[in-house]
Image: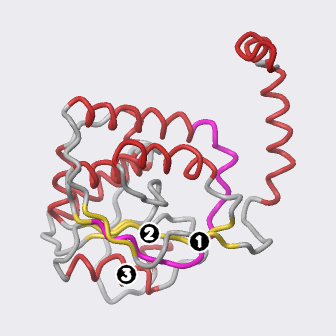
Amino acid sequence: SVFLNTPTKSDKQYISTLKGKGYALIDFWRLSLSQMPQALATVDADISTITPEWIEKLINPILSKRYDVIAPLYTRNRFTAGFTNHVAYPLIYSIYRVKVRQPLAGEYGYSPTFVNYLLSQPKFKTTFKYGIDFFITANALNGGFRMFIRKLGKKFDKPAYPHQGRMFREVFQSAIFVTRSHLVEELRNGAKVTTEGNQNGIDNVEIFPHKKSIPNLFKKSRKGFENCKNDTRKYLQELY
């Protein structure tokens, strides 16, 4: 109701999708292509630092015909985006040999050609959920599309810790599926990546959005360790 009742100069359309980020994006891509767009852009709904310039930065390079996909570079606290920093970024770099600092970005710009390509690619069940972002980045690189990594500034969003376990499983399963399919067909190594400035997006400010979640995180971590300590002792042996 807030979306529909907000005055805008452009038309708005509301669609209801199955639960899952991937379902929402795929339905958006299909709806958008029916409107014959020149460029598309998506942003996560929980960002508190977004500005109008973000949309301009995501769309204008597509309209200029110079690029097929726009990926973001945020300024973030070093303690955020743990899964991105420790799993997704190294996995992308080890397989596709390019540096994409935010391969699980929520903000993208797309050309219609790239969207058609994404819709045609095989998908795993978790691609329709949190695994959609890795799917987008990996297919942009393997498909040889022209990617521009743009600086968007600070990104503050809702803490991911409450659903970190589910997010990890869904992203990792989707990542294994898509990279394995690319390796089977042999990597095309055609990625064309241009970065705006350097990729060090570290912000040393003391405030970060999930700070209040840390005590609960430690509590859950201790509980998880206790529940798995027999397996941990078995596999680590003397390192336990």
State yes or no: residue 148 in magenta.
yes
Instruction: Please state which of residues 92 and 34 is positioned toward the viewer in this rendering.
Output: 92
Q: Name the residue under label 2.
A: 72
Q: Name the residue under label 1.
A: 155
Image quadrant where residue 87 sits? top right
Residue at image position (44%, 55%) is 103
Q: How far apart are marks 2 and 3 (CA)?
A: 9 Å
Q: Is mark 1 on a helix, strand or loop?
A: loop
Amino acid at circle 3:
Lys
How far across and how far down the image is residue 175, in percent?
41, 38
The disc, 2 or 3, on the residue closer to the chain's N-terminal end is 3
Image quadrant where residue 156 sits? bottom right
| Magenta residue span | 147-166
Amino acid at circle 1:
Lys
Amino acid at circle 2:
Pro
Query: Which numbered tag is attached to residue 223?
Result: none
Q: Mark 3 points at which residue?
A: 57
Residue at image position (51%, 65%) is 45
How far across and how far down the image is residue 57, in percent?
37, 81
Q: How far apart are marks 3 and 1 (CA)?
A: 15 Å
Instruction: Please state which of residues 14 and 207 is positioned toward the viewer in this rendering.
Output: 207
